[in-house]
Image: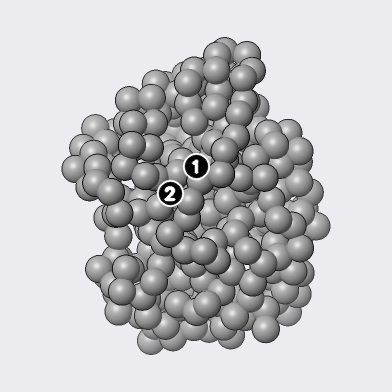
Amino acid sequence: MSSASFKLYAFFMLLASSGPLVVAGPTGAGMTSQVAARSNPSFGKAGSKICLAWAEGNDPSLTNFKTSHVVGLHDYVPEKPSASDALGFDYWPTLWGGDQDKITDFENTVGKKGYGTIILGFNEPNEQGQANLDPVTAASLWVQHIEPKRSFGYNLASPAVSSRPNGQQWMQNFLQSCSGCSIDYIALHWHDTDVNKLKDYLTQYHNTFGKPILLTEFSFQNFNGGAQPTQSEVFSNMTAALKFFDANDWILAACPFGFLKGVTGPNALQNPDGTPSALGKLVINDGQ
């Protein structure tokens, strides 16, 4: 959906098999795969698929959300929270968009071995209010700034499209445009109110592109002005989603959105004092 600031605004308004996909050419033919090592051996395994879509930087409350079920962490920027390594997170730096300041920050931060494990591509490039990149431009930027980072040991996740209907076509056009791009995972965002729609959405992307899925942002929230789910409905949907993630080996990670202080609606994962909300506890304990 957004950078952290946009999402926070939106929330308050609404509260009133593994390996790189190598695209050989414009047709997308020539896809190959190989096993890549992970720094955390639990990555992608049932019971350890939760990741944090964090938006609080170096806030010390991060320590409250690390359990054996929570492996990955991203913060919508290249810089990782200072406690990330000590807490045992796999950090996933992001090249959020194509602006020069974001590219410079990314290049100055991630170009070293051991800094992170997965690079996340552009944030909702199919959305005008987000990265807002056409597939050809995104492919060109990928070749220049993301693909070379494989030499530092990173795996690479595709740009994360939103769940807007144009997202799948955007992804297809990107893959067709990105000659020589190596993509280990398809990254996705999703926001809606029905877990069955989420299941269908993830299954369709997996069936279409044949790659493991990183769901790097999701919530049971309507961002299109429709009715919002109740707290009970959010809990029911989240419980079912966690079971679905663990039951499907092609879903490697899922990052619920809502780790923001001040958010008090049914999707809030963090209390104002930095402790997990009831929903947050459900998530970081994988529904247990």
Q: Which residue has dot 2 on it? A: 118
Mark 1–mark 2 contact, CB under 8 Å?
yes
Task: Give me the residue at 33% from left, 37% from top.
Answer: 151
Q: Which residue has dot 1 on it? A: 157
Q: Nearer the viewer, residue 148 or 73?
A: 148
Q: Nearer the viewer, residue 224 or 37?
A: 37
Mark 1 or mark 2, earlier in chain = 2
The spot of residue 86 in percent (x, y) is 31, 74
Q: How far apart are labels 1 and 2 at the CA level?
A: 7 Å
Amino acid type at mark 2: Ile
Circle 2 residues within 10 Å: few <14, some 14–19, many ≥20: many
Task: Give me the residue at 38% from left, 24% from top.
Answer: 143
The spot of residue 282 in percent (x, y) is 62, 80
Image height of 98 relative to 10, above or below: above
The spot of residue 208 in percent (x, y) is 73, 33
Task: Give me the residue at 51% from left, 46% from top.
Answer: 36
The C terminus: image quadrant: bottom right
Image height of 268 relative to 145, above or below: below
